[in-house]
Image: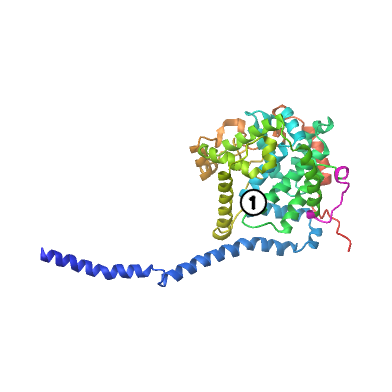
């Protein structure tokens, strides 16, 4: 027994120096502590350097370093800058901001009443397809260049769908201008508030310029509403349209039965696109991000203090994590395909509730997002059969059920008009010295 205790003691005594040495290696006061700290700080510095390298590269490439230089921004430059933002720099929140912008346009009285009465958006079973139609058209605006035939086709189909309501006086020029405003002002606000960095003046001007040339191709009448047709740069255009939009919202962003019905359908569709276990948090969190005016228009309840603090805290944590700990994307997110050379069809890689126009490839069915959707009981690409058009869409497929496949000649006529307005050059008149 004494021998056993002696051996045990020897083992204990021999292991003590080893344990002491092991602890010293990982002690904060040892050389390992400074090395680990240095590696950590080096990684943070690398993330910061690489994260800002893209915007610095864009500023050097285009030369829009100050406000005066923005007056020479071309439509083509604006498109390229916005595409970088949407597909590379801020793909997640740019997409979310665009969805909120669509919600905002549905909440104003005139637009909401037209959609409720003449669109499939108010019908729960048909709403996912109509929402997908609107989303792919918006994606076309940000993914095809000003003089691209595909952009002209997207705008032509939009004009065809609007034409009967404009002719009947149900949609006015001020309604179209407000939809335009929400489409670029909401992403600017949202990205500035929640992304890992604020937008530069160049990026703000680019978003405004992109939507200005879309509005030009849609033949929106600025002069009647703004008493103006020329601007010195995209920021001045944003400022003037924002002044109009503030008065417009005071008049028309109010709760009505039709708007609240649309809000219920849209919120249900939004929540159904995420796992069911997230719904109790997702609903009030969405209400927080909408802001008070939009919540009231849709008739959604005021979120509690707890969920408000949680939502803003999570957004802040994400902002800091992306800013300091995430390397930038090496490749862009592909939201839309190019038109197929044989069929002309375009597919999307993105959907909210039902996978309209999404190809049923192995990757689309088994990537991480698809697996989460599958586990939560949602639809993945390939589900829903031919109705989802996994082969992609033609522009005559866009619209309510009653006009699908119709209006081809009228759309072609609108396309010719849009092509005449398509312009890749500079749309601004420099300010006089």
The image quarter in which residue 412 lies: top right
Q: Nearer the viewer, residue 2 or 35?
A: 2
Q: Is residue 333 left or right of residue 210?
A: left
Residue at 76% across, 45% down: 181
Tell me if residue 341 can be seen. Answer: no
**Image x and y of residue 165, in percent:** 80, 31
Residue at 60% x, 65% y: name it: 49
Relative to residue 45, is residue 272 depicted above or below? above
Task: Identify the residue at image location x=54%, y=59%.
Answer: 325
**Does the magenta-highlighted stretch encompass residue 230?**
yes
Which quadrant of the figure contains the C terminus?
A: bottom right
- Residue 159 visible in the current orientation: yes
Against 307, is 3 above or below? below
Q: What residue appears at the point 41 percent right and 71 percent down from the top-left corner? A: 29
Q: For the N terminus, give its image quadrant.
A: bottom left
Q: Please provide percent x and percent y for residue 347.
A: 64, 41
Which stretch did the figure color magenta?
223-235
Q: Position of residue 390 (x, y in %)?
A: 60, 36
Q: Which residue is mark 1?
A: 87
Q: Would residue 33 appear left or right of 247 to someone viewing this image? A: left
């Amino acid at each position: 027994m004494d021998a056993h205790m002696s051996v045990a003691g020897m083992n204990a005594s021999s292991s003590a120096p080893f344990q002491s040495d092991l602890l010293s290696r990982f002690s904060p006061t040892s050389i390992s502590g400074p090395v680990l700290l240095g590696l950590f700080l080096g990684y943070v510095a690398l993330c910061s350097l690489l994260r800002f390298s893209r915007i610095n590269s864009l500023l050097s490439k285009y030369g829009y370093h100050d406000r005066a230089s923005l007056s020479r921004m071309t439509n083509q430059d604006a498109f390229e800058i916005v595409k970088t933002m949407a597909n590379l720099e801020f793909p997640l929140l740019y997409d979310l901001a665009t969805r909120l912008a669509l919600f905002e346009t549905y909440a104003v009285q005139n637009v909401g009443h037209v959609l409720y009465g003449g669109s499939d958006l108010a019908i729960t079973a048909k709403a996912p397809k109509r929402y997908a139609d609107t989303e792919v058209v918006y994606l076309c605006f940000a993914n095809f260049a000003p003089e691209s035939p595909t952009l002209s086709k997207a705008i032509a189909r939009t004009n065809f769908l609007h034409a009967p309501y404009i002719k009947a006086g149900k949609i006015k020029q001020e309604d179209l201008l407000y939809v335009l405003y929400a489409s670029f002002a909401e992403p600017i606000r949202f990205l500035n508030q929640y992304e890992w960095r604020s937008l530069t003046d160049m990026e703000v001007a680019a978003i405004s310029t992109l939507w200005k040339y879309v509005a030009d191709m849609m033949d929106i009448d600025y002069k009647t509403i703004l008493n103006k047709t020329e601007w010195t740069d995209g920021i001045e255009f944003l400022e003037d349209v924002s002044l109009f939009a503030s008065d417009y919202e005071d008049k028309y962003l109010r709760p009505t039965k039709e708007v609240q019905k649309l809000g219920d359908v849209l919120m249900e569709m939004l929540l159904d696109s995420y796992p069911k276990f997230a719904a109790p948090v997702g609903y009030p969190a969405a209400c927080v991000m909408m802001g008070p005016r939009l919540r009231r228009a849709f008739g959604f309840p005021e979120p509690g203090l707890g969920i408000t603090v949680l939502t803003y805290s999570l957004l802040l944590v994400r902002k800091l994590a992306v800013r300091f700990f995430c390397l930038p994307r090496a490749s862009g997110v592909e939201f839309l395909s190019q038109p197929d050379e044989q069929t002309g069809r375009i597919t999307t890689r993105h959907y909210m509730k039902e996978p309209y126009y999404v190809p049923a490839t192995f990757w689309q069915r088994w990537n991480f997002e698809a697996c989460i959707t599958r586990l939560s009981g949602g639809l993945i690409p390939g589900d829903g059969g031919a109705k989802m058009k996994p082969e992609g869409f033609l522009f005559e497929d866009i619209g309510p059920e009653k006009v699908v496949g119709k209006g081809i000649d009228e759309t072609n006529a609108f396309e010719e008009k849009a092509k005449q307005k398509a312009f890749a050059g500079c749309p601004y008149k420099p300010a006089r010295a």
